[in-house]
Image (spheres, rainbow, N blue to C red):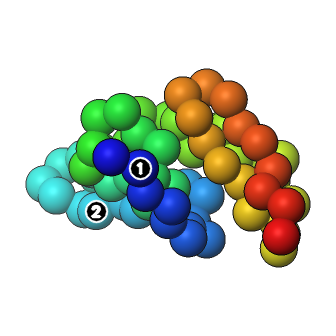
Amino acid sequence: MTRILTNEQTGPYAVKEGKFPLYICACGLSKNKPYCDGSHKKTRDEQPGVVYKYEGDRRTEVKP
């Protein structure tokens, strides 16, 4: 199944639970959802206002 999602978040949400925080994926790229696995690092060089499509480890810019 294919989905196109609009997502502005480029990093995880920290949830304080007990002694250590849990990090919840907010970029949508984690392979360990709902937990962050560091995949958001792929989004560091994204430009504001540009739409990107991720397929596996490949990212392409979506042209309007």
**Whether residue 12 can be seen here:** no
Position of residue 57 in the picture relative to residue 14 (left or right): right
User: Callout 2, which amino acid?
Assistant: Val
Q: 48 or 2: nearer the eye?
A: 2
Position of residue 44 in the picture relative to residue 28 (left or right): right
Please tell me whether mark 1 or mark 2 is closer to you in this view: 1
Q: Residues within 10 Å of mark 2 (few under 14, many from 20)?
A: few
Query: What numbered label is drawn on residue 60?
Result: none
Q: Residue at x 43, y 57 (%)?
A: 3
Most distant residue in the top direction? 57
Most distant residue in the left direction? 18
Position of residue 31 in the picture relative to residue 45 (left or right): left
Q: 49 or 26: nearer the eye?
A: 49
Where is residue 33? Give x, y as percent. Answer: 28, 44
Structural distance between the alpha carbons of marks 1 and 2: 29 Å
Residue identified by numbered label 1:
2
Residue identified by numbered label 2:
15
- Quarter assignment of residue 35: top left
User: Callout 1, which amino acid?
Assistant: Thr
Q: Residue at x 66, y 49 (%)?
A: 53
